[in-house]
Image (spheres, helix red, strand yellow):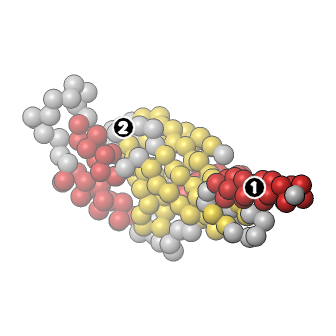
Amino acid sequence: MLFEYSLSTPKTSFYNITTQVREAVSKSGVTNGIAVVYCPHTTAGITINENADPDVVHDLLVGLDNAFPDRPEFRHGEGNSAAHLKASVVGSSATVIIENGKMLLGTWQGIYFCEFDPPRNRKFQVKVMEDKHEHDRDGYTDAKGEFIEAVTKRARGIAEKMDDDNRRQ
């Protein structure tokens, strides 16, 4: 199930989107699975980090600014090469495990939309996927349940053919 959210980002910052992701998980009805949070922009990203102390976001931004300052030798015409570098390092997605209907985030963890080229009107998506476990007749479980099912069906077909052949003799 795919959910899309809009976000206004007036300044360079990390915007806490944990509530929206939690909402998507809740609306999906998925009990066990994963949620992938995705940013479709090249000068923004998604990360999971501490949400208890706002100084952590400040320090992350200072660290990224120091690691990726604007440089006169950059050629990109829009003048936002540093934002592209930061977004590439942070990444465009984060995956969260869902267990018993709840996201398995650590005590201090939050999910952030990272804006590096403000001001913007942005979007992000949350894809919630349920665990699929296929059980064959004997109770074997595999992530590729359809393979086990096909092999089991084929084996049963061969056994039935052998039974028919034996009855004819």
Q: Please give the residue where the numbered disc 2 appears in the rendered image.
A: 42
Q: Residues within 10 Å of mark 1 (few under 14, many from 20)?
A: few
Q: Which mark is residue 104?
A: none
* Label 2 vs 1, first from the N-terminus: 2
Examine the rendered structure and indicate whether residue 77 appears above or below residue 153.
above
Q: Is residue 126 above or below residue 118?
A: below
Of residues 133 and 4, the one drawn nearer to the viewer in this rendering: 133
Residue at the extreme top: 77
Query: Label 1 is placed on what type of residue?
Result: Ile
Residue position marked by numbered label 1 in the rendering: 158
62 on left or right of 28: left
Comparing 115 with 48, the one in front is 48
Rendering coords of residue 116 (x, y %):
33, 43
Instruction: Give the mark toward the camera: 2 or 1.
Output: 1
Residue 163: horizontal and vertical position, in percent?
84, 59
Q: Residue at x 69, y 69 (%)?
A: 140
Task: Tell me what residue is drawn at x 50 percent, y 72 percent.
Answer: 106
Q: Quadrant of residue 101?
A: bottom right
Give the x, y percent position of residue 151: 68, 56
From this viewpoint, which residue is outermost toward the right?
167
Q: Find numbered disc 2 in the image and state the secondary structure of the residue it sits on.
A: loop
| SS type, badge 1 | helix
**How many numbered callouts?**
2
Q: Position of residue 35 (x, y in %)?
A: 57, 55
Q: Is residue 74 left or right of residue 130?
A: left
Residue situated in front as seen by the camera: 64 or 9: 64
| Amino acid found under the numbered disc labelled 2 | Thr
- Distance from Cα at disc 2 to Cα at disc 1: 54 Å
* Residue found at x 36% / y 60%: 57
Q: Residue at x 46, y 55 (%)?
A: 94
